[in-house]
Amino acid sequence: MNLLLIVAGGLSALAALLHLGCIYFGAPWYRFFGAGERMAALASQGSRWPTLITLGIASMLGIWSLYAFSAAGVIGRLPLLRTCLILIGCIYLIRGMGGFYFVTRPMGRSRGFWIWSSGICLTLGLCHLLGLKQQWALLS
């Protein structure tokens, strides 16, 4: 079993659960986790959009978690494992690097949100890609 991929899978799963928490607990959680006042306001008004957007993100993060666990050997092998992990790792890295651009242009979110979320995404991207490199031969 690959520790980096287990960490990546666990953190992606945790992020998915936190997103589901935002749906369940509503506006206060959207605000706390930095989704922006617009999302919080829509959630408090009963709009479906925050729920649909957040559910989409949570679903994606859950699937990414399964791919990391699959490559680590925790669960059975999923299709297109190498390709998906490369894409997942790259998406996390791009989001992480791109987020630092928004520190000076926060678009309704705090500087802290962009710094923390970007750091987390960079860490997750590196865990995915370095773990994949370690497992590459076993995933052929």
Image (cartoon, grey):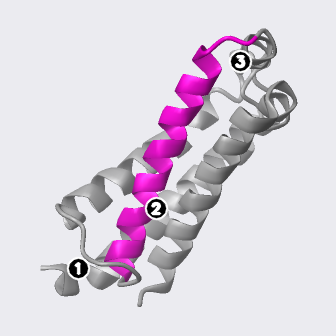
Q: Residue at x 54, y 24 (%)?
A: 52
The mark found on residue 65 in the picture is 2
Q: Residue furthest left?
A: 140
Q: Which residue carries the number 3 mark?
A: 39
Magenta stretch encompasses residue 62: yes
**Label 1 to label 2, Cα distance in Å?**
18 Å
Q: Mark 2 or mark 1, which is nearer the start of the sequence?
A: 2
Please tell me whether mark 1 or mark 3 is closer to you in this view. 3
Image quadrant where one finds the N terminus: bottom left
Say what amino acid the circle numbered 1 marks: Trp
Q: Is residue 102 left or right of residue 63?
A: right
Say what amino acid the circle numbered 3 marks: Met
Q: Which of these two is toward me, 59 or 109?
A: 59
Q: Is residue 87 left or right of residue 49?
A: left
Whether label 1 touches label 3, CB < 8 Å: no
Say what amino acid the circle numbered 2 marks: Ser
Percent position (x, y) of residue 122?
55, 54
Give the prevailing secondary structure in the magenta stretch.
Answer: helix
Q: Where is 115 relative to 105, above or below?
A: below
Q: Is residue 51 left or right of residue 4?
A: right
Q: Residue at x 69, y 19 (%)?
A: 105
**Label 1 to label 3, Cα distance in Å?**
40 Å
